[in-house]
Image (cartoon, rainbow, N blue to C red):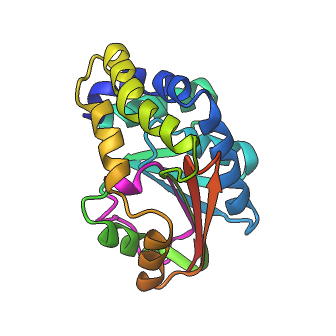
Amino acid sequence: MFDNIAHRYDFLNHLLSMGIDNVWRVKAMRFIRESKPERLLDIATGTGDLAFEARKQMPKLHITGLDLSEGMLSKAREKATSRKMVDMEFIKGDSENLNFEDTTFDAVSVAFGVRNFENLEAGLSEIYRVLKPGGKLAVLEFSKPKAFPVKQIFNFYFRQVLPRTGKMISKDSRAYEYLPESVQAFPEGKDFIAILERIGFKQCKDQALTFGICSLYTAEK
């Protein structure tokens, strides 16, 4: 599915979010930057937007982007070449079976990817394993606004406007129907924090962004 929409993914992301997604990525990387990491793993990197934001804020950071979709990774590599950031590494891999040694990374980031994990706890446990003690985790994920009228506007947009626009531009009828379905099914807020804590993460926090449309989850090993 993600291979099928890779060619229009960036355009649709920025169009459908009206560019707000860029602001969210900046906030996530500001949290990571505070710990002055040397090695970052960006899981579900897609076309690399969060990884590129990391490079922008931390020019000397060693960055590995990982994704299951070769179509998305191909776009990320093209962008890295065009931006003369060829030292960034984009590799194919399974987030629930990471091919890295224990305690390899100082930080891990995930933008709009954890809800796609087949087994959420397995994926988060793998993240915990590859993080160094004291390592930071930043997760951006869509959430469901609770306040009127944002809740009503969000639900209409997510269920009516977004799937139709996404289908029209990407030519994939399934991908943008899957998005609102996966957001509805995701254990957001306190439920997600509880899962992080159960795995062993500490200092777990949930910061609502843009009226609760998105959440920035942060944690430490």
Residue at image coords 66%, 63% = 38
Q: Nearer the viewer, residue 91 or 149?
A: 149
Residue 134 appears in view: yes
Q: Is 22 in the magenta?
A: no
Residue at image coords 43%, 32% = 156
Q: Quadrant of residue 122?
A: bottom left
Q: Is 98 in the magenta?
A: yes
Residue 88 appears at what percent x and percent y?
Answer: 56, 44
Q: Quadrant of residue 28?
A: bottom right
Q: Nearer the viewer, residue 117 or 46?
A: 117
Q: Quadrant of residue 179?
A: top left
Residue sitting at the far front: 148
Q: Is residue 169 above or below residue 158?
A: above
Left or right position of 187 against 53: left
Q: Is residue 180 above or below residue 33?
A: above
User: Quarter of the image containing the C terminus?
Assistant: bottom right
User: Quarter of the image containing the N terminus?
Assistant: top left
Residue at image coords 45%, 78% = 194
The stretch in magenta equals 95-116
Q: Nearer the viewer, residue 201 or 3?
A: 201
Residue 202 appears at what percent x and percent y?
Answer: 57, 83
Residue 85 appears in view: no
Residue 152 appears at what percent x and percent y?
Answer: 49, 39
Residue 192 appears at what percent x and percent y?
Answer: 44, 69
Q: Nearer the viewer, residue 86 or 123?
A: 123
Residue at image coords 43%, 28% = 75
